[in-house]
Structures are given as C-alpha cells and as structure tokens.
Amino acid sequence: MAVHINAKEEIRKAAQEIKEEIISWRRHIHMHPELSGEEKNTSRFVASKLKEFGVDEVIENFGGTTAVVGIIKGKHDVTAALRADMDALPMQEKTGKPYASRIPNVMHSCGHDAHTAILLGAAKILTGLKEHLQGNVKLIFQPCEERHDCGGAKKLVEEGVLQNPDVSAIFGLHVFPELPAGKVGTRIGHFMASSDVFTIKIKGKGAHASRPHQGVDSVLVAAQVINTLHHIVSRKVDPLHPAVLTIGRIQGGYADNIIPDEVEMGGTVRTLSLELRDQIPKWMEHAIWGVTLSYGAAYEFDYRQGTPPVINDEKTTRFALGMMRDLLGKENVVELPEPTMGGEDFAEYLMKVPGTFIRLGIRNEEKGIKAPLHSPLFDIDEDALPVGASVMAYLAYKWVEEHS
C-alpha cells in the first residue's frame, strides 16, 4: 500500500534540519572559488556530496566539461531538472568576512556558491524522500555561466544534458539583492535579455598630428561611429521593445602628436526580442559602413551572439508561482512586474524545454547585506539558503507528481 506524506511539511522540515550543512557548503565553496571552466575542485566537492546523499547516478565531467549531473530515480519516467551554476568572477573580495575568498582576485560575487549549495540541499532533501518520488529529478551543476566561450549551458545542451532521461521541465534559481531575504519572485514570459558582444576596428591612415590632411584620422572616425551607433536604439528600435547598445571599451593611439592608423572598440547589445536581436547587428554594420566610407576609412566588425533572452514558459511559471505560494505563503512570493536587461545562459535550456527562472531574495540591510551582484562587497543573508533549497525540492517533487 502506498504511503502518503505531506510533502510540503516534510520538505520545509528537512530544509531547516540541514540549514547549517547548506551554510557550511556555501562557505566552503565561497572560500575556494574557481573561474569559469576551472571548476575542478568545486565539481569534485559536488560529486562527493551527491554520492554521499545516495543520488542514484552521478556523472562527472559531463560532455567533457567540469559539469556534474546527478539523477534521482523515481517511480515513473517523467523527469524534472534543476540547475545551479558553479563559477566565480575575477575580482578581489573586500567583505572582510571570515569565510571570504582565500584565492587572490577570484570571488563568488554573483552568488553561484549559494546556487550550488542550494541545489545540494535540494538533492539531499529529495533523496530523503526518494521512496515517495513519482518521477526522476535531474540535477545539473553547470560550469561557465559567466563566460560564453568555455562550455556553459549551450555546451551541455549540445551534449544531451536534457536527454536520457528526457526532461519535461527545468527550474533554475538566482540570488537577488533587490528582494528581501526569504522572498522569491518570477514572471511569465520575457524575464532577462539576450547578451551579445561585438568588436569594431576602425582602420585609417596614420599621420603626424600637425598634418591631418595627409592621413585618415581613425580616432575621429571612431568617434563618429560611436555617435551613430548610439542613435540605433533611439531612432531605429520601437520604443516599446527594450534594447541596450553600449560601447564599454575603446583603445587607440601611441602619442599625443600622432594620428593612429587604427582604433578598436568593443561593447554589448541586450534585447528581449529574438527578432530584434537578429536585426540590430545588421543596422550596426550598415551604420559603420556608411561612416567609414564617408571618411575614406575601412573597418572590421565582429559580432558574437552570447546567450538568448530568458523567456519563462507560461505553464511552468504558473505552476511555480502556485507551488511557491503554497510552500512559502502568498506574502513571500512576488510576481515581478518587469524584465531586466541582464543576461543568463539558463536561456539555452529554455530554448529546448519548458522552464522557469526564479529570483531568491538575499537582502538584509540590518545585517549590512545590500551590495549588488558583481560587487567586491557582495554577500548574502544565509537564512535564505534553506528557503531556496526547499523551493527547488518542492518544485521538482510536485512537478513529477502532477505529471506522472
């Protein structure tokens, strides 16, 4: 005879019982951060914990990367996936906390240490409930979210991480300093922007600064290109469709009295629309071509697509909102009114299967925890960790229960 349990209460209770463990895992990872593509020790730590919990299948170095994939096998074929990213950023921590990074110029300033610890917590909770689990849960510990060139979500998808067993829904979570600790939020549809990068080289003709007529001033041409590019969003893009074009880097020149023959610049483009994402580089190249032609200069334009926009599936997001309200109470669940222009490679999974990305509040001004993501002062209110673990575990448990 099947034994029925109150999954909500069991998961809440289990999350609180392992709170100190989740905190200790997070602090261990925080003290030993690893850059994108270098997450070897973090991967070994994750794999050892999954085996310790009794996860049925643990795959290390998935797809030739540092990814770890765990599978908790339930009674039926339906499979839900949960994802956490593991990489840190190249910056020096300045929090002064006892668990601050011990690696110079490397820091978990985007909360991936928390994401990894939270998913480990969810894994331990779910293995404890395995005899009641109606379907499979795939645990994806992903490297390289912060860089698009070293095998992050796109690489894992290409290597089949969403197959064997086939994933019917995926859920991911990211800490969010703009929400109070313990609250969660998400929204249906467009959630985060695409994140593309570009490099432009303006090729002129060098000359002495006192004889500009003998050269083609690459600095002047670059200035005109920048000015023209910044009119694309304001004059070519529908004001109802958000877009950002930013030049973040420019290099050129050798001395105050020399006109250089080349200037290089680079930047990023963010959009919420797949169609607009494809159109903007065409407008950019047309503008660059026109300006350089008028001055007698040449150019090279390299546009590299990074991550697509994060677009939350309606069905899974309505499900997630309902389950989180059930688990945490309506007062602790926020339906976010607007998307953001930040990027996230969780979008790669959403291009293939339905899923939902969630924000977990970690702000606590009384504890002095208010720094933004990617700040050297970034930290989290660790009381939010069991909340995140319970949310991830409950979403997976209920999804396979309702779809088995």
Image (tube, grey):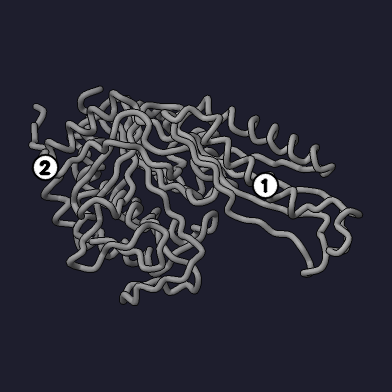
Residue under the image location 70 percent in, 46 percent down: 200
Residue under the image location 82 percent in, 44 percent down: 297
Q: Is residue 134 left or right of residue 87?
A: left
Q: Evaluate whether residue 190 shows in this view.
A: yes
Residue type, numbered disc 2: Glu
Determine whether 160 is above or below 204 in the image: above
Q: What residue is pinned by disc 2?
A: 331
Q: Nearer the N terminus, badge 1 or badge 2?
A: 1
- Which quarter of the image is occupied by the C terminus? top left
Nearer to us in this view, 265 or 91: 265
Q: What residue is pinned by disc 1?
A: 199
**Residue 359 x %, y %:** 29, 45
Q: Evaluate whether residue 161 shows in this view.
A: no
Q: Is residue 24 left or right of residue 12?
A: right
Nearer to us in this view, 168 or 61: 168
Query: Dot 1: within a 10 Å radius of its alpha carbon, few (fewer than 14), some, or many (20 or more) residues?
Result: some
Helix, strand or loop at mark 2: helix
Helix, strand or loop at mark 1: strand
**Residue 5 x %, y %:** 8, 36
Determine whether 194 is above or below 384 in the image: above
Quadrant position of residue 251: bottom right
Query: Are the residues flagged by discs 1 and 2 in contact, CB closer than 8 Å?
Result: no
Residue type, numbered disc 1: Thr
